[in-house]
Amino acid sequence: MKNMKKAGRIILPVLILLTIPFSYVKAQQENHKVKVWEIHYDIYTGSTGESDDVMGEFLKLGKTLLGGDKEPIIKAYVNDNNLRIEQKGLISHVQISNLKDSVSYLLFADQQLAQRSPITSPNVNMDVVGDSIVNTAPTYDETIFKDESKMIAGVKCYRVVLVFDNQNDKDTLDVWYAKGKPKLFWGTYDYLEKIPGTALQISTKQFGTDIGIIATLIEEKELSDSLFKVPEGYRMEDYMTVEDSLSVTEKEDFELSKGLIWEEKDGLWGIKDIEGNTIREPKYDDTYAFEHGLAVVSVNGMFGMINKDAKEVVPIEYTHVFAASEKCTWLTKDKKYALYDVEHQKFLTGYVFDDVSAFSEGLSYVLKNKKYGYVNEQGKIVIPCKFDEAYAFQAGEAIVKSGKKIFFIDVNGKKTETAY
């Protein structure tokens, strides 16, 4: 069995960082001084052939989401033994880590809470591609060291390209790192642990432009080691161990209807009732976590879906399947997507889309004839396919790109007051 969640297109974690906050927490006790590297990061946009107006618009948008102030979006303090990350956004959040014993805490200043956590938390949003499961977080399968260097914040850096899979495509992350300085890795930036130095720039291509984060300051200082300790007065809360987390996840995600249980025989999965009667002969090579009451199952590299009553609601004959909502699922044949009504077991569209997403606020973005638009859960295109880029709706708005313009639209496809 495998845990699989629906994922959309990959966006560099910096876009996630735009919604995570900056909060400096100082321990009440003063301790001895230690040498640490202090590093400040800000949003990076680099030209890839399009107008500087596009880069300016994206930078302006990012700064607006961050509140428009001049503080760095990330502050890092690191040496060979310890790490502290202070990030900026909407929720107060600091991470402190002991790199020697792998103990890490998330500090929430507004709650006076210290929660033990893993140093890194790689995304496990999985997608089915043919007979493979692809992690859509930046988990790379190839590392290419380039014979290139440049100066960043006064420090000589070297380039490495990380190549990873994104469904049928290859995506890349550009990382510029400083040799001879401590490794800097945390949260969803787990891949940086394999970089032989401190990453001072991370970027990928979005909206036709290189975007990411870049160091604006790197200095070695002597600072109090209280930076790396839980402040006095904080309530301590233990985080689930990996084993506990997995067991709970499996119990929740793989639970069938009452009276039914999974059974495994010779590496294949089936379903029986609690009296031992076989409901489904073991034939599934893999089963995946339930999403919206449906679970993907595979046989000989082809995929379908079952519900919690063990009924195969989507035949096992597709190269790619994921639950798009409680009512619908996207099915793939010959690299084209079609929307399928699971309840009534009928197709709502033909195989006409090249890219799709899960439904958010009743809409899914779709790519048709190299242009993005949006469909509803009845399969009707309600916002025409006319955009060069489109992303999921949140709070009634979605970011889109048309030509050189990046702006917000509402659920009717009209520009909003927050458009740029």
Image: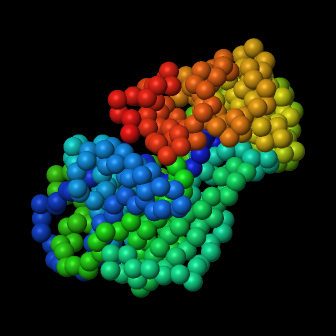
Q: Nearer the viewer, residue 402 or 125?
A: 402
Q: Residue 283: x and y, percent?
A: 86, 38
Residue 150: percent from left, percent from top: 44, 80
Q: Is residue 357 visible?
A: no
Is 359 above or below relative to 203?
above
Q: Is residue 218 above or below residue 134?
A: below
- Would you identify the image quadrant in which residue 216 lies? bottom left
Quadrant the C terminus occupies: top left
Residue that appears at 23% across and 56% down: 70
Specify the farthest residue to the top. Answer: 344
Which residue occupies the foreground of this view, 31 or 13? 13
Which quadrant, please, contains the N terminus? top right
Residue 146 point in image, percent of width and height: 58, 79
> Does residue 343 appear left or right of residue 266 in this picture?
left
Q: What colour scheme does the image use? A: rainbow
Give whichever of 291, 332 is nearer the camera: 332
x 31%, y 44%: residue: 64
Q: Give the number of callouts.
A: 0
Q: Tell me if I can see residue 125 in this picture.
A: yes
Q: Is residue 304 above or below residue 246?
A: above
Please tell me which residue is depicted at 47% across the width and 73% down the height of the picture. Answer: 176
Give the image location of residue 138, x and y in percent: 56, 58
Q: Quadrant of residue 298?
A: top right
Q: Give above or below for 107 relative to 388.
A: below
Q: Residue at x 26, y 77 (%)?
A: 219
